Image (tube, rainbow, N blue to C red):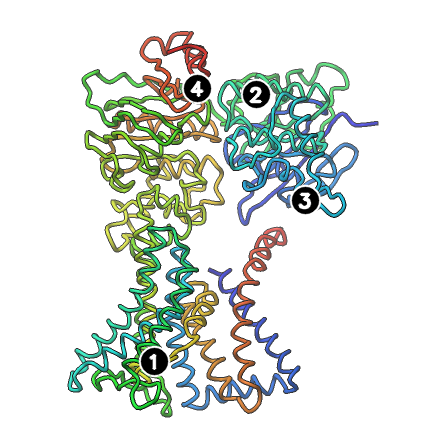
């Protein structure tokens, strides 16, 4: 646990350092940029809200990737599962009668979002379990399939009035905003925290979680001990996809209230960063998502100082730093007992 | 002048808060076979790894020939330069590379910018032939049996010019007939001037091969023994001991060595009474076939019976165990506790009352990075509950198994990777043999690479489950183990059951020879 925290801390510090160097290269003072970023994010309600809004989608996709990772599966397709969630949630939301009350409309739309994501990822799990198809290949390829189907359906059926936006969802399916200076943060944040708690509970307190982690650590040992590796692979991928699909709640039900092409683009990939930076622990993923959300929202808040591409680069640097810091921390620990002697 | 001692080591090593070696000493005379013995967790493997530069010591010194080096400054590159070769317990070859590629790894010979392996391959073949160990330099290591892979490592070490050769549990993966060849080869190498350090648990091997013996217990050297008494022959190098070398010493006496290892006398095992012929079958196989590895195996284990499966490694033992556990596709009938189980999942078979101790605890036995408690409860819904894990029950289960098998450290939260091999094996045995309503047990190499104390514990547990009403099938390459445990022993040869020795014939003096003949196919059964 301590090692995980060290790895994450080193990664964050390293990316701050790299970011500072990049700022020097473009000729602005890192102290000024970081200072302004923190100040504008945390003193301006709107910017804070935008950070939480970005973090909500990132956290759900991060939880999705983390859950699969625990079962030894690299779900690189959260992007496509999220897109499937957006498509299902917005289409069903728009099909609901305008007068549908919230207690019916919201669960129905949430189920559609999670179900569509789960269906896409569950297929990946099924291919893995029955045919041995590698989940990285099949899930990343499904990203393209889902994006293509979304756009095609949009063009054929959903887009209205010459725009790339579909019909609005039933008002009852809209999630309430949380205020914060008119920002986009909405009740999906609470759903996300509940989902994180549920993932934590499943992972650490149930036989499902134990089976997932056993398969992730050593499938042969799990199989020998009577755990069905195939069932775990299908279930874990389905649950993972459902979490990624649930991010549509934030984007569709809480923000756009309609289908839109490219809604949430790249969030699924950034979710991989959140999972890796959060070391696959639900609490870690939430913290990582907040950090990545800060870089995203804060980057926009200081757009006149540095190009927004810089903050996108920083998010990439964080992941590289996480990957690089793991062996570093492991070595430091191996050395530690000797120094104590 | 070359000093007569090839190795003179005094080493301290800690892993975190745990002291594995507390100033353990080892003095090895040049050109001798030196046995390093002790229970699992005594620090034998760690000591030889420090000497071979694989693990860095925390304190102490290594005297090698004329040089004395702080143990903390030693590494594998320097050890290789000092001509120290090591063949590790679980092998250290890259499975996807060939024998010759492994041999040159890290020091690849290059000609005109290209890898030049032909010369090395020929040299390996010649080296192997010279010591009576045929190796195929171009075979991929993962396709070799454990014994053949080990031979390849020995030949490669000698080819690299090792004049100190360290072997960690070299006979653990060998069949009895192969063990004799291995021991003879070690004697032969020593006669040619190679210094051999062999880590082992088996006292008959020590007696057969060793000139000197060092006994470790809990990280300290507690006794040394020598074929030549230390007081004899003036100038005996063992008389020339480092300061503080205060261990007891004496001539080679297996009983005394065993006492030094465990710190107490071991109780003699008692053979279980044979169950009546009318006892119901708990495990029944009919014509079980697995590809070409196992052909039409038919076998019946009654309630309370312990049946052994002997054979040279690689004659279908592994497939037999996996077929019973449902872990490989097989044809034929399997019945567990009278219920047909062919074609069912591993989970279903466990539910029918099967327990399976897999051949290799590192491959399919344990989650090495999980705790003792988690491994003991792995897949055990009867302990954890169906959905929400009953953590109190898991802790209670772990505590009970730790006491039952004397698992060390006695800490349910200890990570299994940090345990010695014997204690890891106790965790597997603890989990499997504590299953409720046990009807049939398949124990595959249940005490491979495990020390005497742990062997006794594991054998006790196997006997206990047989007495409690299970049918037990023990698959082992160790004839002594089978003779100590079993009512009957069947022999596998080339995937088929070649014969059986049981009843009075098993207790007769000729039993070992009869089994040996069946194992090698010397007689028609």
Q: Look at the picture and state if B64 lies above or below A84.
A: above
The answer to which of marks 4 and 2 sits earlier in the sequence is 2
Measured as percent of width and height from the top left, residue A150 is found at 33, 75
The part of the image, by quadrant, that contains residue A310 is: bottom right
Same chain for labels 1 and 4? Say yes or no: no
Measured as percent of width and height from the top left, residue A141 is found at 41, 64
> Measuring 58% from the left and 41% from the top, which residue is drawn there?
B97
Which residue in the protein does label 1 denote? A251
Which residue in the protein does label 2 denote? B206
For the residues labelled 1 and 4, the Cα–Cα distance comes to 68 Å
Same chain for labels 2 and 1? Say yes or no: no
Label 3 crowd bin: few (<14), some (14–19), many (20+), radius 10 Å: few
Q: Secondary structure at mark 2?
A: helix
**In the foreground, B289 or B163:** B289
Q: Do we see residue B249 in this rendering?
A: no
Between label 4 and label 2, give the one nearer the viewer.
Answer: 4
Measured as percent of width and height from the top left, residue A337 is found at 59, 52
Same chain for labels 3 and 2? Say yes or no: yes
For the residues labelled 2 and 1, the Cα–Cα distance comes to 72 Å
- How many callouts does the rendering have? 4
Q: Look at the picture and state if A299 lies above or below B271.
A: below
> Measuring 44% from the left and 91% from the top, which residue is drawn there?
A44
Which residue in the protein does label 3 denote? B106
The answer to which of marks 3 and 4 sits earlier in the sequence is 3
Q: Secondary structure at mark 3?
A: loop
Q: Quadrant of the C terminus of chain B?
A: top left
Dots 3, 1 in contact, CB < 8 A: no
Q: Chain of mark 2?
A: B
Between label 3 and label 4, give the one nearer the viewer.
Answer: 3
């Amino acid at each position: 646990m301590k090692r995980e925290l060290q790895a994450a801390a080193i990664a964050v510090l390293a990316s701050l350092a790299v970011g500072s160097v990049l700022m020097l290269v473009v000729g602005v003072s890192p102290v000024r940029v970081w200072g302004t970023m923190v100040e504008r994010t945390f003193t301006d309600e709107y910017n804070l809200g935008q950070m939480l809004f970005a973090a909500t989608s990132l956290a759900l996709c991060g939880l999705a990737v983390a859950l699969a990772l625990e079962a030894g599966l690299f779900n690189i397709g959260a992007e496509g599962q999220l897109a499937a969630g957006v498509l299902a949630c917005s289409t069903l939301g728009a099909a609901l009668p305008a007068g549908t009350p919230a207690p019916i409309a919201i669960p129905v739309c949430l189920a559609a979002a999670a179900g569509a994501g789960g269906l896409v990822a569950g297929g990946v799990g099924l291919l893995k379990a029955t045919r041995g198809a590698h989940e990285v290949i099949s899930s990343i390829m499904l990203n393209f399939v889902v994006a293509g189907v979304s756009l095609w359906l949009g063009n054929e059926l959903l887009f209205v009035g010459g725009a790339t936006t579909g019909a609005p969802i039933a008002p009852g399916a809209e999630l309430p905003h949380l205020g914060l200076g008119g920002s986009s943060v909405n009740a999906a944040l609470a759903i996300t925290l509940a989902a994180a708690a549920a993932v934590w509970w499943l992972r650490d307190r149930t036989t499902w979680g134990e089976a997932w982690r056993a398969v992730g650590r050593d499938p042969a040992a799990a199989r020998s001990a009577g755990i069905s590796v195939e069932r775990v692979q299908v279930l874990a991928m389905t649950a993972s996809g459902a979490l990624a699909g649930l991010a549509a709640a934030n984007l569709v039900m809480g923000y756009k209230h309609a289908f839109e092409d490219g809604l949430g683009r790249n969030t699924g990939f950034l979710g991989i960063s959140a999972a890796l930076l959060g070391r696959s622990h639900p609490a870690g993923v939430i913290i990582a998502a907040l950090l990545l959300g800060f870089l995203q929202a804060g980057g926009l808040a200081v757009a006149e100082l540095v190009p927004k591409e810089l903050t996108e680069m920083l998010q990439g640097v964080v992941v590289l730093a996480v990957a690089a810091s793991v062996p570093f921390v492991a070595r430091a620990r191996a050395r530690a007992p000797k120094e104590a002697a | 002048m070359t000093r007569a001692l090839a190795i003179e080591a005094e080493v301290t090593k800690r892993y975190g808060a745990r002291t594995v070696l507390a100033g353990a000493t080892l003095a090895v005379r040049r050109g001798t076979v030196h046995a390093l013995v002790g229970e699992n967790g005594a620090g034998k493997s760690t000591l030889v790894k420090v000497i071979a530069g694989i693990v860095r010591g925390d304190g102490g010194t290594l005297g090698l020939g004329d040089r004395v080096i702080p143990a903390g400054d030693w590494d594998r590159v320097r050890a290789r330069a000092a001509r120290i070769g090591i063949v590790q317990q679980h092998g250290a070859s890259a499975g996807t590379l060939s024998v010759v590629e492994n041999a040159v790894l890290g020091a690849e010979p290059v000609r005109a910018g290209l890898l030049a392996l032909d010369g090395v391959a020929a040299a390996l073949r010649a080296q192997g032939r010279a010591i009576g160990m045929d190796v195929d330099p171009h075979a991929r290591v993962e396709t070799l049996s454990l014994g053949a892979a080990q031979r390849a490592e020995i030949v490669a070490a000698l080819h690299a010019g090792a004049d100190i050769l360290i072997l960690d549990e070299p006979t653990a993966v060998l069949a009895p007939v192969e063990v004799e060849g291995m021991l003879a080869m070690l004697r032969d190498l020593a006669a040619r001037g190679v210094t051999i350090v062999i880590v082992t648990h088996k006292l008959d091997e020590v007696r057969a091969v060793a000139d000197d013996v060092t006994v470790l217990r809990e990280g300290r050297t507690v006794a040394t023994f020598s074929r030549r008494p230390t007081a004899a022959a003036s100038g005996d190098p063992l008389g020339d001991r480092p300061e503080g070398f205060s261990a007891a010493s004496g001539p080679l006496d297996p009983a005394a060595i065993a006492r030094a290892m465990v710190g107490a006398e071991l109780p003699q095992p008692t053979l279980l009474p044979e169950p009546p012929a009318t006892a119901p079958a708990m495990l029944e196989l009919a014509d079980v076939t697995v590809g070409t590895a196992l052909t039409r195996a038919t076998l019946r284990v009654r309630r309370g019976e312990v049946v052994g499966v002997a054979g040279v490694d690689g004659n279908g033992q592994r497939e037999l165990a996996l077929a019973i556990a449902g872990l490989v596709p097989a044809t034929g009938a399997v019945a567990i506790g009278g219920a047909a189980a062919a074609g069912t999942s591993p989970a279903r078979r466990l539910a029918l009352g099967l327990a399976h101790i897999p051949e290799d605890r590192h491959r399919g036995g344990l989650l090495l990075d999980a705790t003792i408690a988690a491994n003991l409860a792995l897949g055990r819904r009867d302990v954890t509950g169906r959905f929400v894990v009953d953590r109190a029950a898991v802790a209670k289960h772990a505590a009970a198994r730790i006491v039952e098998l004397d698992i060390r450290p006695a800490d349910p939260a200890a990570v299994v990777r940090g345990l010695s091999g014997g204690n890891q094996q106790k965790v597997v045995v603890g989990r499997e043999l504590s299953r409720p309503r046990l009807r049939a047990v398949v124990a595959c190499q249940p005490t491979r690479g495990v020390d005497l104390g742990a062997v006794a514990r594991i054998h006790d547990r196997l006997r206990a489950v047989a007495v409690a009403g299970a049918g037990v099938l023990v698959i082992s390459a160790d004839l002594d183990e089978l003779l100590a445990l079993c009512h009957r022993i069947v022999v596998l040869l080339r995937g088929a059951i070649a014969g059986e020795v049981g009843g009075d014939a098993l207790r007769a003096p000729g039993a070992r020879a009869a089994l040996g003949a069946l194992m090698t196919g010397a007689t028609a059964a």
